[in-house]
Image (cartoon, rainbow, N blue to C red):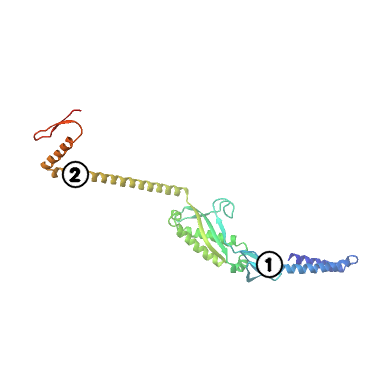
């Protein structure tokens, strides 16, 4: 379009030269033809518009936004129409306490008060995209700076409005997923009203006050000590049970021996032992007694 405007200027110069005295007047025809040619080329080039992949174009003619959206590719349009492109790919907006990690410089984490009056710091990432057929609505009602006007304030408000219903420790542990689901529903509803589509909410980090963190660590250490002591007690019980079973076995064995052995059985066992001694290769002298055990004499 710039070439067409420049051509109009050249054409006006040609008309002015035509009314000027010689010798400037003789160049008016050439200048006018050049101006007309530039206008024609400029208008011709302005009729062709290429929309890049992952984007859509919104047309506005003399300030009036048109509803039809130009998708990616080559289009022939009215050369007087202004085209505003919108990125429809997934975008990420991060608010973090870590410097240079998010879109804002410095500490941009969200600080909220929990139901128990403690300040909790939350790092959040919002994954979203522009709804293609709602791009004209965004241009007409919000403008191109929808990130600062919609994405950032809606996300931070969702965190603050929902965090007050939870205790700090619950946000950090057992209620974290429930909290994330609530802000996800809140942001989804508000984005949809304004032509944006929420894809995912990532509660990246929840930082508790130092006093609360120390209390949690102390509780965890106490629980670990209790579990360790429980293990030791269980081990001691098992050892005591083992000793009791062993003692019971010895007692049962002795009881069996005391009640089950007769004189004849003892005499039989003694004869077997004497036989084994007699068959031994060692030289010995055996003196047989009467009723008692034999006396064994060895030459070694």
Location of residue 250 in the rendering, given as x and y in whole percent from the top left corner: 21, 43
- Asked if labels 1 and 2 touch by Cβ distance under 8 angstroms, the answer is no
Which is nearer the eye, 101 or 284? 284
- Residue at image coords 52%, 56%: 124
The residue identified by callout 1 is 49
Location of residue 45 in the rendering, given as x and y in whole percent from the top left corner: 73, 67
- Residue at image coords 36%, 48%: 227
Q: Secondary structure at mark 2?
A: helix
Which mark is nearer the camera, 2 or 1? 2
Q: Which mark is residue 33?
A: none
Vertical relation: 156 (above or below) 7: above
Disc 2 from disc 1: Cα separation: 103 Å
Vertical relation: 48 (above or below) 219: below
The residue identified by callout 2 is 253
Q: Secondary structure at mark 1?
A: strand
135 displayed left or right of 177? right
Crowding at mark 2 (Cα within 10 Å: few <14, some 14-19, many 20+)? few
Q: Residue 70: which quarter of the image?
A: bottom right
- Residue at image coords 55%, 65%: 197
Vertical relation: 74 (above or below) 111: below
Q: Residue 69: which quarter of the image?
A: bottom right
- Residue at image coords 53%, 65%: 190
Which is nearer the eye, 38 or 21? 38
Location of residue 147 in the rendering, given as x and y in whole percent from the top left corner: 59, 60
Q: First in sequence, mark 2 or 1: give its number.
A: 1
Which is nearer the eye, 102 or 57? 57
255 displayed left or right of 108? left
């Amino acid at each position: 379009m710039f070439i067409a405007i420049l051509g109009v200027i050249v054409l006006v110069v040609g008309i002015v030269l035509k009314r000027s005295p010689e010798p400037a007047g003789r160049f008016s025809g050439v200048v006018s033809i050049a101006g007309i040619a530039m206008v024609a080329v400029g208008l011709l080039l302005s009729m062709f518009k290429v929309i890049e992949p992952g984007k859509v174009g919104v047309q506005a003619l003399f300030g009036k936004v048109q509803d039809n959206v130009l998708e990616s590719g080559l289009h022939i349009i009215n050369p007087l129409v202004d085209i505003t492109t919108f990125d429809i790919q997934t975008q990420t907006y991060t608010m973090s306490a870590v410097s240079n990690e998010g879109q804002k410089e410095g500490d941009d984490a969200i600080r909220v008060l929990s139901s128990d009056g403690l300040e909790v710091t939350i790092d959040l990432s919002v994954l979203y995209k522009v709804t293609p057929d709602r791009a004209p609505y965004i241009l007409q009602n919000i403008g191109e700076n929808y990130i600062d006007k919609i994405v950032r304030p809606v996300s931070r408000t969702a965190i603050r409005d929902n965090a007050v219903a939870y205790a700090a420790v619950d946000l950090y542990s057992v209620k974290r997923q429930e909290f994330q689901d609530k802000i996800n529903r809140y942001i989804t509803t508000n984005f949809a009203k304004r032509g944006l589509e929420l894809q995912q909410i990532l509660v990246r980090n929840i930082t508790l006050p130092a006093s609360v963190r120390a209390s949690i660590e102390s509780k965890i250490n106490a629980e670990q000590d209790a579990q360790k002591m429980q293990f030791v007690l269980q081990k001691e019980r098992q050892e005591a049970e083992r000793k009791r079973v062993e003692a019971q076995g010895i007692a049962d064995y002795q009881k069996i021996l005391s009640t089950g052995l007769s004189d004849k059985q003892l005499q039989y066992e003694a004869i077997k032992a004497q036989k084994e001694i007699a068959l031994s290769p060692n030289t010995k002298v055996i003196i047989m007694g009467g009723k008692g055990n034999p006396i064994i004499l060895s030459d070694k």
